[in-house]
Image (spheres, grey):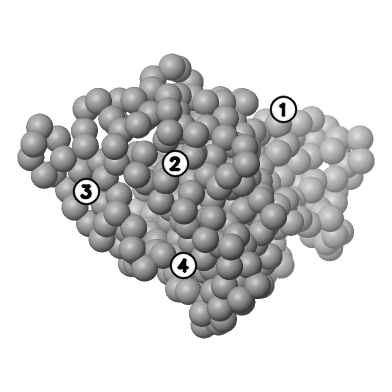
């Protein structure tokens, strides 16, 4: 793979872009800045290409550099890899074999120089030349981008909008710009934390990251992990790919205390919640469309309809199709109210779900669930339920590999 990348990289001639060609007529040494700091390294030009002294540059970047008199090979070593340079010809390494470069390194007075574009790419930096200031500036991939990327993955979890997705995100076609995010919950957070556990910058404008979300509140302790590939579009970071990797959910240790407090202080209100929820399931099981509609959260119906790209994905069509072509039933047991707010409530219960089509039982399951409800139109309405009975783990933890040309 590295060989293919290098061949492409040099074939398109990125080493000698116009801004660097202008440097050939400047007799003054070009000053090098790395991550906005001036270095002692002086650059030279030859035949329109800017070169950087290999040993000083590699050591500045934290690599180890050596030279073999016998083989005339120059080595750059890191903790994880070793690269070989042949000054007169080009580049090679122990895994991919020899590759001839369009612009090989050069020897001047016994000192080896690398084309600055290759040196930047090899050490994962972008580079730009300022002809008027006679300076070259290298910036490490991801330098100064940590907060912007963290803000992106936090918004993805808490305030999602379609605008967070890259223009060629695979799921963007199925969402509309009028996408309405889930309603903000009244349940207070006890712990909410977003941790980027791993990040690899694949270019100046692209990164692969693993993110752990920790969200504990009064009704659930949740920890889930997502892998993202993010890309910069119009100077803003966007989600290009994403995959849900794992989920660990448990009930808080003091949830029984919450149930007891609600019963003691709001017994009539919690009985109304359970009664309205039973009404919803009864209407759904009997395929009573009007009553199901009445006891479904108006906010969720509005959100589903706003997100629908055609009439086949509206709440009405989905619900009527479910009633017409299948027989889905829910039976609730051991129900208890674990959260009670002004407009929202949560019920903890055991749900038994079954689906029958053409008089043949296709699926059946029983699971522990948290059922979320909204208050509207004078009663409580079903919003959605969350299965907390088992944790999930995706064994494939990688996104498909994508390569983009470096853009500066």
Residue contact at pointers 2 and 4, CB within 8 angstroms: no
Residue 228 coordinates in the image, percent (x, y)? 51, 50
Q: Which residue is mark 1?
A: 18
Q: Which residue is mark 4?
A: 336
Q: Which residue is mark 3?
A: 354
Q: Quadrant of residue 312?
A: top left
Residue toward you, 306 or 298: 298
Answer left or right for 142 relative to 200: right
Q: Earlier in the sequence, mark 2 or mark 4?
A: 4
Residue 180 coordinates in the image, percent (x, y)? 61, 34
Residue 369 coordinates in the image, percent (x, y)? 40, 61
Element assignment for label 2: loop
Element assignment for label 1: helix
Asked if residue 224 shows in the view, the reply is no
Q: Which residue is mark 2?
A: 402
| Real-space CA distance between mark 3 and mark 4, rounded to the nearest whole angstrom | 22 Å
- Which quadrant of the rendered structure holds the C terminus? top right
Q: Residue at x 34, y 44 (%)?
A: 282
| Real-space CA distance between mark 2 and mark 3, rounded to the nearest whole angstrom | 41 Å
Asked if residue 232 shows in the view, the reply is yes
Q: Residue at x 62, y 26 (%)?
A: 178
| Real-space CA distance between mark 3 and mark 1, rounded to the nearest whole angstrom | 66 Å
Residue contact at pointers 3 and 1, CB within 8 angstroms: no
Residue toward you, 146 or 127: 146
Crowd class of label 1 (few under 14; some 14 to 19; many from 20; radius 10 Å):
few
Crowd class of label 4 (few under 14; some 14 to 19; many from 20; radius 10 Å):
many
Element assignment for label 3: strand
Q: Nearer the viewer, mark 2 or mark 3?
A: 3
* Residue positioned most to the top: 311
Element assignment for label 4: strand
Residue toward you, 278 or 132: 278
């Amino acid at each position: 793979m590295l060989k293919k990348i290098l061949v492409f990289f040099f074939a398109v001639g990125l080493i000698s872009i116009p801004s660097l060609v202008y440097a050939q007529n400047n007799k003054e040494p070009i000053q090098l800045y790395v991550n906005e700091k001036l270095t002692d390294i002086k650059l030279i030009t030859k035949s329109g290409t800017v070169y950087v002294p290999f040993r000083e540059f590699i050591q500045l970047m934290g690599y180890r550099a050596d030279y073999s008199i016998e083989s005339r090979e120059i080595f750059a070593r890191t903790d994880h890899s070793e690269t070989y340079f042949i000054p007169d010809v080009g580049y090679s390494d122990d895994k991919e074999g020899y590759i001839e470069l369009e612009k090989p390194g050069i020897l001047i007075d016994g000192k080896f120089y690398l084309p600055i574009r290759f040196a930047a790419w090899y050490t994962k930096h972008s580079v730009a030349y300022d002809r008027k200031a006679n300076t070259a500036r290298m910036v490490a991939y991801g330098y100064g981008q940590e907060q912007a990327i963290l803000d992106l993955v936090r918004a993805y979890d808490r305030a999602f909008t379609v605008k967070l997705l890259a223009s060629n995100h695979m799921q963007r076609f199925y969402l509309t710009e009028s996408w309405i995010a889930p309603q903000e919950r009244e349940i207070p957070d006890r712990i909410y934390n977003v941790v980027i556990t791993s990040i690899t910058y694949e270019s100046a404008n692209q990164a692969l990251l693993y993110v752990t979300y920790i969200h504990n509140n009064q009704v659930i302790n949740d920890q889930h992990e997502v892998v993202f590939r993010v890309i910069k579009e119009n100077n803003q970071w966007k989600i290009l790919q994403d995959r849900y990797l794992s989920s660990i959910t448990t009930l808080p240790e003091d949830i029984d205390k919450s149930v007891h407090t609600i019963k003691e202080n709001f017994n009539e209100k919690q009985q109304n919640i359970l009664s309205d929820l039973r009404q919803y399931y009864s209407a759904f099981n009997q395929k009573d469309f009007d009553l199901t509609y009445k006891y479904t959260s108006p906010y969720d119906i509005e959100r589903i309809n706003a997100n629908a790209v055609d009439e086949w994905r509206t709440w009405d069509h989905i619900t009527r199709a479910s009633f017409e072509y299948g027989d889905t039933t829910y039976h609730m047991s051991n129900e208890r109210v674990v959260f009670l707010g002004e407009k929202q409530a949560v019920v903890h219960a055991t749900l038994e779900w079954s689906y029958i089509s053409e008089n043949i039982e296709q699926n059946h399951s029983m699971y522990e669930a948290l059922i979320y409800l909204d208050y509207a139109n004078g009663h409580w309405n079903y919003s959605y339920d969350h299965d907390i009975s088992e944790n999930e783990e995706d064994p494939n933890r990688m996104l498909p590999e994508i390569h983009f040309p470096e853009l500066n």
